[in-house]
Image (spheres, rainbow, N blue to C red):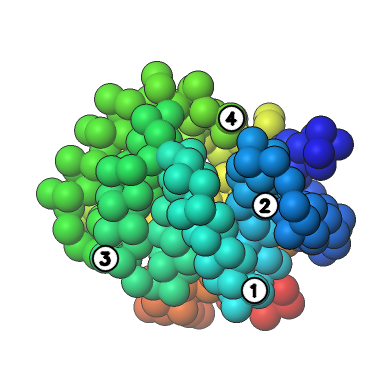
Amino acid sequence: MTELELQLAELQRDRWSVAPAVLFPPAFAGWQQVETMLNRRVLLPTARRLTLMAGHFAVELSTVARFGGDDRLGRRFADIAEEHAIAARDARLTGDVAGLQAWIAMDAGQWSVAADHAALGRASADRSQHARLAGYEAAAAAEAGDHQRAAEATIVMRATKAAGRLNPKPWGDSDEALYIALTSAATPGAGGIAIRHGEQAATAFATARAHQGVGLARLSMARGHLGGDHPEPDAAAATAIEALDAVAASPNAPVHLRASRLYQEQLAPWSREPLVQELGRRLTAV
């Protein structure tokens, strides 16, 4: 069990920087081993420890599957994680599941649903997860056009940041900067804020080799370049290409999906610009 817990910790450490195709097979084998042990007759304290471990493995497998572009498998493992969270009645696992559900809804473009998952999850999650879930709610609410709700969630995110540092998946300055950038990118008139905080987040995540964070931060900056009275489509396209470069070594479907939305929806009026066309070619080649 201790070896499996170490494997889980390594998976949580590497999920941002290692390709999903490399991460998934050993993680799946570890989860199967935990589930096999859980199905044996074990003492109650051991059963709880195994239930929590199986749930956290399922959370990571859902995340890795989504990064690899397999949404169906991602949803299935999210369901399994939720079953274990209910069985264990554990606040941190419950919070992780809420975050998964919010991100699955965001990937599907169901922004209000995503904000609701994050808000409801925060009510029963460990306090160390409140900042992360509030960040998810803020970003999703802004995309849904509910800017008052986004502003209120941002206040909660900032107010609970100190507790977030105590979580096994710590919430720090780079995370806060990213979710301010993502929220601002979807807020009219806040393009400059998205660029400034996106650059701060991208620099910090690059140092930590958290490739998805770099990609999402660059995409928020790209959207920032399209805000205001003087859009800069070349700058937006160039920054989106940098986002794709950030995840080239560890493919990340959410980053690719958001880059595609940017290209198809927001850069459409400038489809003849050379850098916009290059972005289109890069997306086609993924």
Q: Estimate the spatial distance between the alpha carbons at disc 3 and disc 4, rounded to whole Å.
A: 28 Å
Check disc 4 and give the amino acid type.
Pro
Which residue is labeled 4 in the image?
168
Give SS at disc 2. Answer: helix
Name the residue: 45% across, 45% down.
89
Give the quadrant of the C terminus.
bottom right
Mark 1 and mark 3: Cα distance apart in space: 23 Å
Task: Give the amino acid at mark 3.
Answer: Ser
Amino acid at circle 2: Ala
The tag on residue 112 is 3
Amino acid at the residue labelled 1: Leu
Q: CA distance from mark 2 to mark 4?
A: 16 Å
Label 1 vs label 3, nearer the camera: 1
In the rendered image, which quarter contains the N terminus? top right
Sequence-wise, the earlier of marks 2 and 1 is 2
Q: How far is mark 2 from mark 1, CA to CA?
A: 16 Å
Nearer the observer, 136 or 99: 99
- Mark 2 and mark 3: span between their CA atoms? 30 Å
Which residue does the image show at 67% across and 80% down from the upper left? 284
Residue denoted by label 1: 73
Single out the mark in the foreground, 3 or 4: 4
Disc 4 and disc 1: Cα gap in Å?
25 Å
Which disc, if any, is residue 203? Answer: none
Identify the residue under disc 2: 54
Local crowd size for mark 2, using a 10 Å CA cut-off: few (<14), some (14–19), many (≥20): many
- The mark that comes first in sequence, 1 or 3, is 1
Residue 79 or 15: which is nearer the viewer?
79
Marks 4,1: beta carbons within 8 A: no
- Please tell me whether mark 2 or mark 4 is closer to you in this view: 2
Relative side of 158 to 80, left or right: left
Q: Secondary structure at mark 4?
A: loop
